Amino acid sequence: MRVLVVEDFEPMARAIVTGLRREGMAVDVVYDGDEALDSLAVTRYDVVVLDRDLPGVHGDEICRRLAAERSPSRILMLTAAGSLTDRVDGLNLGADDYLAKPFDFPELTARIRALGRRAAVPVPPVLTHGDIRLDPSGRVASRGGQRLALSTKEFGVLEYLLGRAGRVVSAEELLERVWDEAADPFTTAVKQTMRRLRAKLGDPPVIATVREGGYQIGEPDA
């Protein structure tokens, strides 16, 4: 899941980013409204965690623009303004969810995952294929009832492929959706991660390589 955190209080922004990355999410962070619009113009995010009172372009205006553009990104407003009126106003602007500060981090994570399941490609809360089962919220993947010891990126790649229900996914798409903006576009990280993931999944193979296309769960189309 690709997430953009827009928060001008840098200590809080860094804490949120660190926590979400530990949960296996690919997270970018910006500190004002102008930077947020620049990032949104070039990257498709599943969820935008958006403070309202931002320097530059106000968070409310960012929310209005995304709603007017029918952006596939889901918006979670995260702000100190937590009255009923504030929440209603935020939702009426086009936000999909609203969480007041201070907040409990497990609740923030759960709300982001819930919004991610409602993004452009809706996915169920638990992903399965044959004897493979993956629970994103519990960070648990298994095959044949045996838990798989996956790294954060291996888990993210498997989660993304399972969520695409057999669709072919290119290496470039995996790099964009599972890694963050710090990833080198010329890196072999996807290929290396895929090799390790396949080894851990074992036989019979479940991730097919589609020539000049990418990867998919199951056999490639004839």
Image: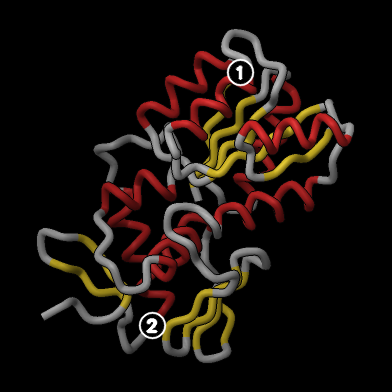
Identify the mark nearer the N-term, 2 or 1.
1
Q: Which residue is mark 1?
A: 31
Q: How many marks?
A: 2
Q: Residue at position x 64%, y 9% from top?
A: 55
Q: Position of residue 195 (x, y in %)?
A: 32, 65
Which amino acid is tagged 1? Tyr
Task: Judge by depth and name the residue closer to the eye, 137 or 53.
Answer: 53
When the figure is inspected, residue 45 is found, relative to residue 168, above or below; the finding is above
Instruction: Check the image and name the residue furthest to the top.
Output: 56
Protein image colouring: secondary structure
Q: Position of residue 65 (x, y in %)?
A: 50, 26
Left or right, residue 42 beside residue 140: left
Query: Disc 2 to disc 1, how far (Cα)?
Result: 43 Å
* Contact, mark 2 vs mark 1 (Cβ under 8 Å): no
Name the image quarter holding residue 125.
bottom right
Helix, strand or loop under label 2? loop
Q: Position of residue 20 (x, y in %)?
A: 64, 45
Name the image quarter holding residue 179.
top left
Helix, strand or loop under label 1? loop
Q: Residue at position x 39%, y 34% from top?
A: 43
Q: Which mark is residue 202?
A: 2
When the figure is inspected, residue 98 is found, relative to residue 171, above or below; the finding is above
When the figure is inspected, residue 69 is found, relative to residue 164, above or below; the finding is above
Which amino acid is tagged 2? Gly
Few, some or many residues within 10 Å of mark 1 (<14, 14–19, 20+): some
